[in-house]
Image (spheres, rainbow, N blue to C red):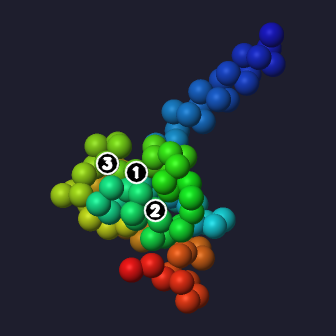
Amino acid sequence: MIVGNSITIVLAALTTSAYAICHIGTSIDMNCCWGGAAGEDACFRQQKSINCGNGIEQANFCKNIGIDRTRCDADCCDPRTGWGKPCPKGKNACDGTNCPN
């Protein structure tokens, strides 16, 4: 019973502390949401991951946490201020020769 309660407490702490997260490769910013026109576009420009379009990253789209494009037009935004910020340092989709338009 103690183990069950401990797991519940840990899971509750994790879910309440996760607001919006941007990650590129192994670089993670725990205070970041995907901006752009719809979130998916910014996520794909930075990650080029299928997770941007299949719903896995949807909770991290700025538009889904109340920050629309008029507040932040950048690829990565700060959910607390609604302003653009640098995306996590990592190998993004524009590294190499396959930069999307």
Quadrant in which residue 23 is drawn = bottom right
Structural crowding at the residue carrying mark 2, measured as other residues with C-alpha within 10 Å and reported as few (<14), some (14–19) or many (≥20) = many
Hey, what amino acid is under mark 1? Phe
Disc 3 crowd rating (10 Å Cα; few below 14, some 14-19, many 20+) is many
Q: What residue is shown at x 48% (from left), y 82% (from top)?
A: 99
Q: Amino acid at mark 3?
A: Lys
- Secondary-structure class at tag 1: loop
Q: Position of residue 78 (x, y in %)?
A: 37, 57
Above-or-below relation of 10 to 40:
above
Q: Position of residue 6 (x, y in %)?
A: 74, 22
Residue 43's disc number: 2
- The reply to whether the C-beta atoms of the residues labelled 2 and 1 are less than 8 Å apart is yes
Q: Is residue 49 above or below residue 4?
A: below
| Mark earlier in primary sequence (2, 1) | 2
**Who is closer to the viewer here, 71 or 9?**
71
In which quadrant of the rendered view does residue 96 lie? bottom right
Relative placement, left or right, of 36 versus 59 is: left
Q: Residue furthest bottom?
A: 97
Report the residue marked by disc 3.
63
Residue 61, numbered label: 1
Label 3–label 1 contact, CB within 8 A: yes
The C terminus - image quarter = bottom left
Q: Quadrant of the N terminus?
A: top right
Q: Residues within 10 Å of mark 1 (few under 14, many from 20)?
A: many
The answer to whether residue 39 is left or right of residue 56 is left
Coordinates of residue 49 in the picture (x, y in percent): 57, 63
